[in-house]
Amino acid sequence: MAEGDGFVPGRYGQETGMSRSRTCDVCGATLIVSPHGGRPARYCSSACRQLAFRRRAASGVTPAVSTAGGSVLPPALDSFVGRRHELSGLRTLLRSSRLLTLTGAGGVGKTRLALEFAKGLPKRFARVDLVELASLQDSTLVTQSLAAALGVGERAGRTGVDVLVRAIGDASRVLILDNCEHLAEPCARLAATLLGRCPRLRILATSREALRVPGETVFRVGELYLPPADAGDDATALMQSDAVRLFVDRAASNSPGFTLHRGNGHLVAEICRRLDGLALAVELAARHVGALALSDILAGLDDQFSQLDLLTGGSRTGPARHSGFAAAVDWSHRLLDPAEQAVFRRLSVLVGGFDATAAQAVCAGDGIGRRQVFRILCALEAKSLVVRLPGETAPTRFRQLSAIRVCALDRLRASGELHATLRRALAWLTELAGRGRGEVFADQAGSPLAAERDNLVSVLACSAGHGDAVLVRLTLELARVHYQQEQPSAARALLTGLLRGAGGRALGGQVPALAARVACQQADLDEALRLGEQAVQSERMRRDAAGLANALDARAAARLCRGEFAEAVADLRECLEVVASPSRPQDTAWCTHHLAWALLQAGGELEADELMSRCLPVLRQQAPWPRTAAALHTAGAVRLALGRLRSAETLFAEVLRIAPGASFHALYPVEGLALVAAESGDMQRALRLYEASVRARRRLDTEPEAPWWHRMEQAAARARTRLSAAAQDAAVAGARGLRGERLVAYALGAGSGEDRTRRDVRATDERLRLTVRESTVAELVAEGLTNRQIADRLGLSIHTVATHLDKVRDKLGLRSRTQIALWAAARTEGGCTARR
């Protein structure tokens, strides 16, 4: 009999020409099994099968997991957490692909996902076989290892692949080739041959890089889903994260009674974030729960030297590569050639990610050319040792996952290359900073180092104590980035050190000017003015026109915050005289815009409007969008002060169309449109936009300039006096659902001119048929509230709410609650309100 028919020495009692026999596992009766296909029987009857099941249950032995067609996979001894989307995606892909390769970083959970997926395969697959390759070192033995896993041996002159092809035949089978990365080439050749000769075979491979076989579908297994940044301590929201659920599950196994609650939720979430959701790293960290407090685990992960110690202590019975995270990374590291190993460890100094240019600047040298680095970077990404950051921004950015980076940094220290790599990183960052030289108002321009903030922080920290001019310059640039990203505490700490040192004084008025702006952000107005005066004095002594213009602008900002409008106007008029030059039209336009804003506060709306008409076209054409957005807002505020509401509305709307909806830049025009609504008599819309802006500013932790916000609060107070209590409640309730792009859409939805007038008239005609209470109830229905919730909100009985809804149906000719909700939502989204 040919071995390909499934004969396994020692498994069957006797071989015959047409059939093979074996005995029942319970009673020993002889079983006759067909030699062609099907799963070999183990029992002679259902009675023996049931008896065997009862014996296993009584003994407490966990049976191996049976899958489609009765194949056997090793049983899981712990629970499988999450990955619902991945499992669904794999099921879809396996229908159309015969070679599906799961790739991803070491410890991301490829093997466990593959096994869990295999357990749920449909019954049309006669067998599912697992072939574990991790322990195999000889590439020539791949075929033999697969044959051994399938339980086939050489027979009748057939050897190697022929034996496997004969054994698999045209049966519908699935092979799981686990951990192919160190044997990628022989695995690829074998997979291509088997798929070509076995028409109903499918292969599911796990590897840290693709096999690169024609027809292969690569499925990248990413990190576990992390909790959203705004989840806080909400246990329900946090448990939606696969990473948090895995941590809690494994922590509870190690420390019975451990649960997630409001007291520890933020710590668990932050631990998972620091570990980038890497399944193995999360499990290893969770094993320390009980022995260490969560705060101690988090502190250990912050320390690069102790993080590797925390991420140890894996299962004694699991693969050696999972005994600790360093072992998992070492497994991948051994597969790299020397040049790849060098680039891998040098990239570890770039904690904030990098593009190809940054990688070349930092990693080239000592025998590795710049052109080599790009090829190696692609190879490391293919091997899952760096990951591509999501998004379609150019240039493409990559990063090393946190735990992988710590391992790479440990190797960089051991290689003796740390200081040389840091010097190259400093040179690269200095070159980037140099691109911003020549900016008069650099504090308010987009810093070329904004995208590299975390790299700048890390490299400066590692280079602390050198005290040279390069570090001083980069420290100022970092403070500038913190200021622009509204992180004044971090900026002020750096600037305080520069103001005390000789290196900072060498930069003239740049340091105190930026420090004055930072003090304004922190509402430390006396200090802001002192620092502004220091900056002006320093630059007058240096006779640097550009430096003096910047210092005057900073002092004017401090005076505006203090309400000293006339003095601010004087500073900005001098600034404009200093900076005005045909060769610097954008700087001149920017200073003109600032002067117009100061004049608006001082009551000079007409001059401010004339100045904006001169500078706005230049900024629209030449300036980056944040500067254009600021100038458009100023122009809108000036037109608002002049009572030109339609023009102001158009300008504010233009800001909303260029500013990201989730940024603080979008809030000023939203507030401007609230003021337009208030001046137009649309008090409910004004109050709704005001309340939505308040909530958004609270979420973003940002505050507007005091004069602007004072005007907003006055408008909101006026709206409240004009609205009934129910209308106020409806406006506040409506604001709760407005955030991000939805807030922008609502703010833009009002329209202007005749279109809005027609909508307002139509809405008024419809709403005049309803009482104030009926309108309010309809709006609350549109928000999804039940009758009970509406009753609680308005202090009514459920019966009264139902009566109001009946009257709404009768007056508007609507038949259902859904129609009421759609009607009210249409009125709200259109920006229409009743004139009460």
Image: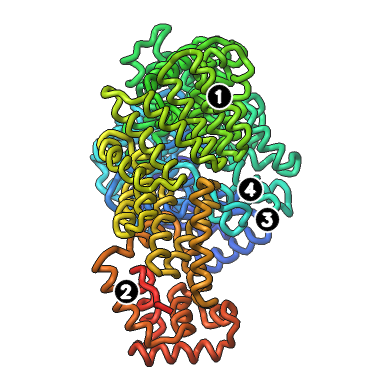
Picture coordinates of residue 353, whole percent (x, y): 45, 29
Residue type pointed to by label 4: His
Please say if the residues under marks 1 and 4 sit with CB atoms less than 8 Å apart.
no
Mark 4 against mark 2, which lies toward the viewer? 2
CA distance separating discs 1 and 4: 37 Å
Residue 753 appears left or right of 344: left
Return the residue at label 4.
266
- Name the residue located 62 percent from the left edge and 32 percent from the top edge: 527
CA distance separating discs 4 and 3: 9 Å
CA distance separating discs 2 and 3: 49 Å
Return the residue at label 1.
512
Dot 2 or dot 3: first in sequence order is: 3
Return the residue at label 2.
760
- Between 318 and 662, the residue placed more toward the observer is 662
- Crowd tier of the residue under label 4, counting other residues whose Cα lies within 10 Å: few below 14, some 14–19, many 20 or above: many
Dot 1 or dot 4: first in sequence order is: 4
Residue 263 appears left or right of 212: right
CA distance separating discs 4 and 2: 47 Å
- Between 620 and 541, the residue placed more toward the observer is 541
- Image height of 71 relative to 765, above or below: above
Picture coordinates of residue 439, whole percent (x, y): 38, 24
Please say if the residues under marks 1 and 3 sit with CB atoms less than 8 Å apart.
no
- Image height of 157 relative to 342, above or below: below
Q: Which mark is residue 261?
A: 3
Residue 163 location, quadrant: top left
Picture coordinates of residue 129, whole percent (x, y): 42, 45
Dot 2 or dot 1: first in sequence order is: 1
Dot 4 or dot 3: first in sequence order is: 3
- Crowd tier of the residue under label 1, counting other residues whose Cα lies within 10 Å: few below 14, some 14–19, many 20 or above: many
Residue type pointed to by label 2: Asp
Please say if the residues under marks 4 and 3 sit with CB atoms less than 8 Å apart.
no
Dot 1 or dot 3: first in sequence order is: 3
